[in-house]
Amino acid sequence: MIKIGTALFEACEELERERGISKEVLIASLCDAMVAAYKKHMHVKDAANIEAILDEQTGEIGVFSTKTVVENVEDPDTQISLEDAQEIDDEVEVDDEVKIEVTPEQFGRIAAQSAKQVITQRIRDAERNNILNEFLEKKGTLTTGIIQRVENRNVIVNIGKTDAIMPQKEQIPREYYKPGNRIRVFVLNVKETNRLPQVIVSHAHAEIVKELFELEVPEIEDGIVEIKSIAREAGFRTKIAVWSNDPEVDSVGACIGPRGSRIQTIVGELKNEKIDIVRWSPDPVEYIVNAISPARVVSVDIMTDDEETKDALVVVPDDQLSLAIGREGQNVRLAHRLTGWKIDIKSVSQMENEEASRNANYNYDEELPEEEEERPVDSDEIAEEIEEEMNQQELDEDDIQQDEVEEETSEEE
């Protein structure tokens, strides 16, 4: 056995406090290091029955070989005779297992070198796993960090046990990130690497606004007011749709707070980013009208309403068109993302001009006389018509002959 004293246990306890690596993991790493050093020293590749045992009471560690007690030894590496086994323990019997110390002499220095390498690697692995598990649990939540530096347009933020990366696309435009400042970020993703896990954070995610509202508005935390949807263009404007499960509680008023105290706190946290609080509605027409605010709406026509395409036409007064669309289309773009509807905005004048244009281009067809309805052919009617024509013809011939006779009589006189 090798005497290592109590200093090892004190070091394990200190590492457990500072880095969160359990004492058991460190002791197991030391034992594995002893076994690895023994195999290397003894030139043994396969030694499944070799193990290191640490006695915490005496502070000693040694390498032991587990052997099976047999009457006739066939494999001396894994078997021991009954006589030899009883010299170690008088009560052993055949098929029992005994542990025999095989710690080589002058093994302390070799074991220490090997143990240093193994323990260092195990500490790194354990630390990486602890950080990975911790931030996997924090994924999708807010955390607070301190800005360390800016590298290649990426902001490095210390969030406790590791440094996180905030890519440029997750930063707020025109925001100055000064080293040393505290910042609230959203844990976007955690990637496992060979070294420490890579944590990706965001300062522009819409969930930041949601969690700020949950912190400032007690009705949201209590479940009375519910956040239905959020659309954000970080640094410029955010639209948030809320709904009250209690008819006596105004969802919008609860988010604004007394004299706007709650919303002012959130706006200050977001560096004066404009926030539109919209009342959610199950009626798509009413929801779209609310989402287009602060612009007034004349009418909303649902063009298509299916799962793949949701199109709506919104008509606003002429003086409200630019407000409804917003600067560079921001207002209607956020309304689309908030509601999930594709919104086409037009003014009253535009609708009237389109209607007049359609009327001018419309060609009216001349009215054609109605065709007489065809009747089915009747053979009796045809026979009667023929008979009438023949009778009329005979009458006409009689009249002609009578006229000729009267003319001859007149000439003779």
Image (spheres, grey):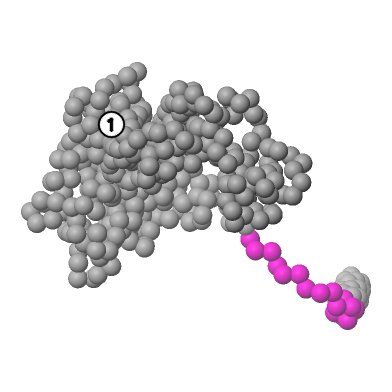
User: Magenta span covers which residues?
Assistant: 369-385
Q: Quadrant of the C terminus?
A: bottom right
| Amino acid type at image mark 1 | Asn
Write the residue at 52% across / 26% down.
Answer: 105
Q: Report which quarter residue 20 is drawn in.
A: top left
Write the residue at 28% across / 21% down.
Answer: 150
Q: Is residue 395 above or below residue 125?
A: below
Asked whether residue 401 appears in the rendered view, the answer is yes
How far across and down, in percent of the image, does residue 106 sit?
A: 49, 24
Write the residue at 41% across / 50% down.
Answer: 340
- Please say whether residue 292 is one of the residues in the magenta stretch: no
Q: How many marks?
A: 1
Viewer-nearest residue: 339 or 91: 91
How far across and down, in percent of the image, does residue 78 sit?
A: 68, 41
Q: Is residue 325 above or below residue 305?
A: above
Asked whether residue 343 appears in the rendered view, the answer is no
Q: Report which quarter residue 220 is drawn in.
A: bottom left
Viewer-nearest residue: 63 or 413: 63
How far across and down, in percent of the image, does residue 338 sit?
A: 35, 48
How far across and down, in percent of the image, does residue 63 sit?
A: 53, 36
Viewer-nearest residue: 6 or 263: 6
Residue at the disc numbered 1:
158
- Please say whether residue 375 is one of the residues in the magenta stretch: yes
Q: With 393 as the anchor, is 273 left or right in this view? A: left
Q: Residue furthest top?
A: 152
Q: Residue furthest left?
A: 259
